[in-house]
């Protein structure tokens, strides 16, 4: 299986992993060097940075050496901080459910589409038209997202227990496509478990080798905790591959992240 990474996605992943630790903005020259090490050519870096600037993710700023650079916007920093909690598994699984009920006037149907797409990106499952559900631990992040998008006027959020009438595990299998989620976990394992085995049996990687291995692994992994939002384990199939995928990523993170930082900022 060949792993595909877009330049824009790798840049976002870079800022999430390393870019916020710079003293000031990341110089453009450093972005070109570091994304080049990940296989992205300089023109693609520059054009992707321009697109991220137009989208409001990056803003121009001076680097510590006075050169031109880019740093995350304030909104992007909040987004990345929400991502930290999700991606690195710091939020405990809740036994409660978060329910989002929304109604958008027909003349504002573009907001209806935006609302649906953002709830799906957050990992909500669909119960019925205008009714979406997620594990309770997503309440704070969902609130942040709806506030950033100015969508709170259209949504009511509730948190509580599932009281029936189908068994909860059966309901979860309707609300989420568990087969598709399992396949995403298995694809991550196919791509990155061999890297971990090599690390476990071989010498310590150089800082550059650690960075080259970590950035694409993180770029793939960071989507999975959104597609699979932390459903209670007892509601999932017995052979659920998400447990192994999370363990593989956690060990890759422990072995590679800090080593790669020495290549990013020698």
Image (cartoon, helix red, strand yellow):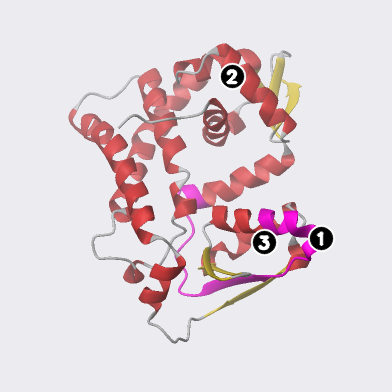
Q: What's the residue at 40%, 27% (across, down)? A: 259
Left/right placement of residue 77 relative to residue 153 reads left
Q: Earlier in the sequence, mark 2 or mark 3?
A: 2
User: Residue at label 2?
Assistant: 45
User: Residue at label 1?
Assistant: 107
Q: Out of 264 and 212, give the one closest to the viewer.
A: 212
> In the image, which residues are magenta?
86-114
User: Residue at label 3?
Assistant: 143
Instruction: Confirm whether the magenta stretch covers residue 214.
Output: no
**Contact flag, marks 2 and 3 (Cβ < 8 Å):** no
Secondary structure under badge 2? helix
Secondary structure under badge 1? helix
Q: What's the residue at 57%, 12% (across, down)? A: 42
Q: Is residue 16 above or below residue 170?
A: above
Q: Out of 61 and 184, give the one closest to the viewer.
A: 184
Left/right placement of residue 246 relative to residue 98 reads left
Left/right placement of residue 106 relative to residue 175 reads right
How far apart marks 2 and 3 lie (CA) works out to 32 Å
Q: What's the residue at 56%, 52% (across, down)? A: 121
How far apart marks 1 and 2 lie (CA) works out to 39 Å
């Amino acid at each position: 299986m060949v792993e595909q990474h877009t330049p824009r996605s790798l840049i976002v992943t870079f800022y999430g992993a390393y870019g916020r630790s710079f003293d000031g903005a990341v110089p453009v020259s450093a972005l070109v060097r570091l994304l080049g090490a990940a296989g992205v050519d300089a023109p693609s870096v520059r054009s992707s940075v321009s697109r991220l600037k137009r989208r409001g993710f990056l803003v121009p700023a001076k680097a510590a050496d006075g050169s031109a650079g880019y740093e995350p916007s304030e909104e992007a920093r909040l987004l990345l901080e929400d991502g930290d909690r999700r991606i690195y598994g710091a939020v405990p699984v809740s036994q409660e459910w978060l329910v989002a009920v929304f109604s958008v006037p027909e003349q504002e149907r573009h907001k209806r589409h935006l609302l649906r797409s953002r709830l799906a990106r957050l990992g909500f499952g669909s119960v019925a038209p205008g009714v979406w559900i997620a594990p309770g631990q997503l309440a704070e992040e969902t609130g942040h997202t709806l506030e950033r998008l100015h969508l709170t006027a259209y949504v009511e959020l509730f948190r509580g227990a599932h009281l029936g009438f189908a068994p909860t595990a059966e309901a979860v299998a309707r609300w989420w496509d568990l087969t598709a989620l399992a396949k995403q976990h298995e694809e991550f394992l196919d791509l990155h478990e061999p890297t971990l085995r090599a690390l476990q049996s071989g010498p310590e990687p150089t800082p550059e080798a650690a960075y080259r291995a970590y950035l694409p692994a993180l770029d793939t992994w960071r989507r999975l905790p959104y597609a699979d939002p932390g459903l209670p384990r007892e509601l999932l199939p017995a052979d659920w591959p998400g447990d192994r995928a999370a363990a593989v990523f956690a060990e890759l993170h422990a072995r590679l992240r800090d080593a790669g930082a020495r290549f990013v900022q020698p």
